[in-house]
Image (cartoon, rainbow, N blue to C red):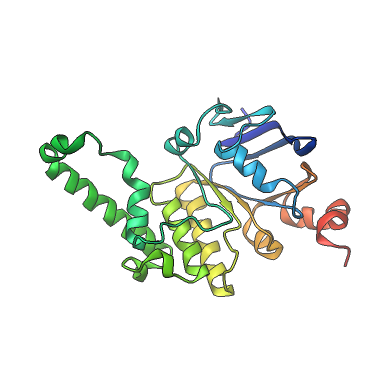
Amino acid sequence: MSGYVLEARGVGVRFGGVRALTGVDLGVRAGEVCGLIGPNGAGKTTLFDVLSGIRRPDQGRMLLDGVDITRRSPVWRARHGMRRTFQRQQLFGQLSVADNLLVAQEWRGGGGGLAADLVAFPARRSRERARRERGERVLAGCGIGALGASYAGGLPVGQARMVELARAVADPPRVLLLDEPASGMSAPERERLAAVVRRLAREEGCAVLLVEHNVAFVMDLCERVAVLDLGAVLAEGPPGEVRANPAVREAYLGTA
């Protein structure tokens, strides 16, 4: 009824005597890029952990397409279209870039042991070929098509971030959670990242929620911005409105 693809309702998380999140209400719609900003320790990554199923909240619930997923596992959420990147790089460093994207699609088929492999070998080869072709298209769409044969562990930070994004969307996402995707990127790389994210939202209808400390990047890219402070939503709305909010300026952006 809310129109949100992914939604948090009254989410609270406590670490001992510390409340990391307090009654957070936040959602993101199909085709929308929503930014989440706030000072260090505001609870942004904790909220991502809850949304992706890594951590269960102490109160509240999460909905995916209106279905309560509060007790669903990260694997279940991933298989129903939720993808996530992390602050720290999570690439398989000893695999090639192309194979990193292949791994992300592997859950759609396989299994059954050696006997099944021998019987279904032609079908398996056909599936792998299709997945590799999909991976090549995704890498090209992210502007890193030339990196397919490179080992992921040897890439500069900016390129590795783009590979993480490509891997997250190798299997088409319904919801994409990006945790500091522009960290370590140069200005041209940030422009490319923004272009890819906009295309995912507008052309593929993906709901994108991103956490980022580069406020200028967020304000330029996102249609809606939410500000977390001390575990609660301090403000939410269009970028210009949030930027002009006196409470946001005092808590995070500064008064200049």
Q: In which quarter of the image is the N terminus?
A: top right
Q: Residue 140: x, y in percent?
A: 37, 64
Left-right relation of 61 to 193: right
Could you tell me which residue is drawn at 54 percent across and 74 percent down? 188
- Asked whether the viewer can see residue 4, the reply is no
Left-right relation of 34 to 107: right
Total tally of numbered discs in the picture:
0
Q: Residue 35: x, y in percent?
A: 66, 52
Q: Residue 244: x, y in percent?
A: 83, 57
Left-right relation of 93 to 225: left
Seen in the picture, residue 156 relative to 171 is either above or below; the reply is: below
Q: In which quarter of the image is the C terminus?
A: bottom right
Q: Residue furthest front?
A: 16
Seen in the picture, residue 165 relative to 19 is either above or below; the reply is: below
Could you tell me which residue is drawn at 22 percent across and 33 percent down? 112
The quadrant where residue 113 appears:
top left
- Asked whether the viewer can see residue 140, the reply is yes
In this rendered view, identify the residue nearer to me: 174 or 49.
49
Seen in the picture, residue 141 relative to 7 is either above or below; the reply is: below
Q: Residue 106: x, y in percent?
A: 32, 44
